Amino acid sequence: MTRHIAFYAPLKSPHHATPSGDRTIARGLMNALGSVGNVELVSEFRSRDGAGDAQVQADLMAQAETEAARLITSGARWDAWVTYHNYYKAPDLIGPKVCSALGIPYHLIESSRSPKRLTGPWSRFAQLADGASDRAAVIFYFTGRDLPELENARPADQKLVHLPPFLDRVDLPPLGVRNDGKTLLAVGMFRTGDKLASYQNLASALTLVQTAGWSLRIVGAGVADAEIRALFAPFKSQVTFVGGLDANGVATEMAGADVFVWPGVNEAFGMVFIEAQAAGLTVVAENRIGLRDVVGPQGFLTPPNDAASFATAIDNAIARGSVAKDVRSYAQNHLRGAAEQTLENALQFNEASL
């Protein structure tokens, strides 16, 4: 019997017009779930409140009631429900209601608990996000970043399952032809905040790199363009700004580079690190909790905000030369096939579908 899976992403729909890591992951999850059953995106309702506005939250809760009622009375029947990314700024306000009404198992992928948000402007949304986490039969987590809080509050009958981040592809990309072994690559949006901080850390480290003849290609575009270009002005011809590229363009850049250099300030994990390793690049990143789950043993993880250590890691990565075979072997475990197996093994379904 064919199993029918309801899929929902309260932060950003897989069909959203604006590209982002969240949209990419949502699309990949739908494709992976497609190996388990028929997957339907059941709602495009977005519950995000980025400002902590009580009235906005009240309006979203009212809209969610209407959306949940629509799904409950639609006549559609699913054997399992999967929600991707439930947290205090964008809680799942729909899934728990629909699953309770229809009697189907409820699952979460990447759900976080934030005790410190249970007071303050997001307190109601944080409570609702925790309520959704309490309701889930299974919570799949990508990295160890959220695991401690999930463990602390886990209901006795709830399963926590590690779903390693994965590329939405079944095989590795072709291995590119490297040049001089000294071509560095960075990929990141030109935004203020954490992205700008990563570029600041990278620029600081480059002033301390001892290897002669290195070059850096930067893929990215955005509102912080002037600030980021100014950071790398001292390096003149050693740094090339490629601009914003689509996935194929990024893959082409990775195929011709040697070392991927991206500090990853406050990255949840960063799919780009897996993409770089799949392309055979050595990764140099900062040793942050999410990144430890996606940078393999051939990569270099340095103390956060430590320019000297990051520079030394770049020198060591260049001096060591290519380890593409080992790096790609690690990335093999982060392809869609591995995710499909994990989901197949852990998802729960309405008894009528089994």
Image (cartoon, rainbow, N blue to C red):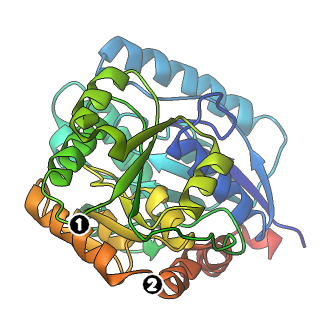
Q: Residue flagged by tag 1: what amino acid is it?
A: Thr
Q: Is residue 194 above or below residue 59?
A: below
Residue under label 1, please give it.
Answer: 211
Q: Residue 57, how many percent across, how many down? A: 39, 21
Q: CA distance from mark 1 to mark 2?
A: 19 Å
Q: Is residue 273 above or below residue 102?
A: below
Circle 1 or circle 2, nearest the eye: 1
Are there few (<14), some (14-19), or many (20+) residues within 10 Å of tag 2?
A: some
Residue 27 visible (yes or no): yes
In the current view of this chain or complex, which residue is farthest to the right?
1
Question: What kind of element bears circle 1?
Answer: loop
Quadrant in the picture for the N terminus? bottom right
On the picture, is 265 further left or further right than 172?
Answer: left
Residue at the image position 49 percent from the left and 71 percent from the top: 277
Residue 81 visible (yes or no): no
Q: Residue flagged by tag 2: what amino acid is it?
A: Val
Q: Quadrant of residue 32?
A: bottom right
Residue at the image position 27 percent from the left and 55 percent from the top: 263
Are there few (<14), some (14-19), or many (20+) residues within 10 Å of tag 1?
A: some
Q: Is residue 273 above or below residue 118?
A: below
On the picture, is 328 further left or further right than 222?
Answer: right
- Residue toward you, 330 or 176: 176
Which numbered disc flags the more N-terminal residue, 1 or 2?
Answer: 1
Q: Residue 12, how many percent across, how many down? A: 55, 36
- Residue toward you, 219 or 103: 219
- Residue toward you, 233 or 38: 233
Quadrant in the picture for the C terminus? bottom right
Q: Residue 352, how many percent across, how many down? A: 80, 70
Residue at the image position 70 percent from the left and 55 percent from the top: 30
Residue under label 2, please give it.
Answer: 323
Q: Give the label on residue 238, or none.
A: none
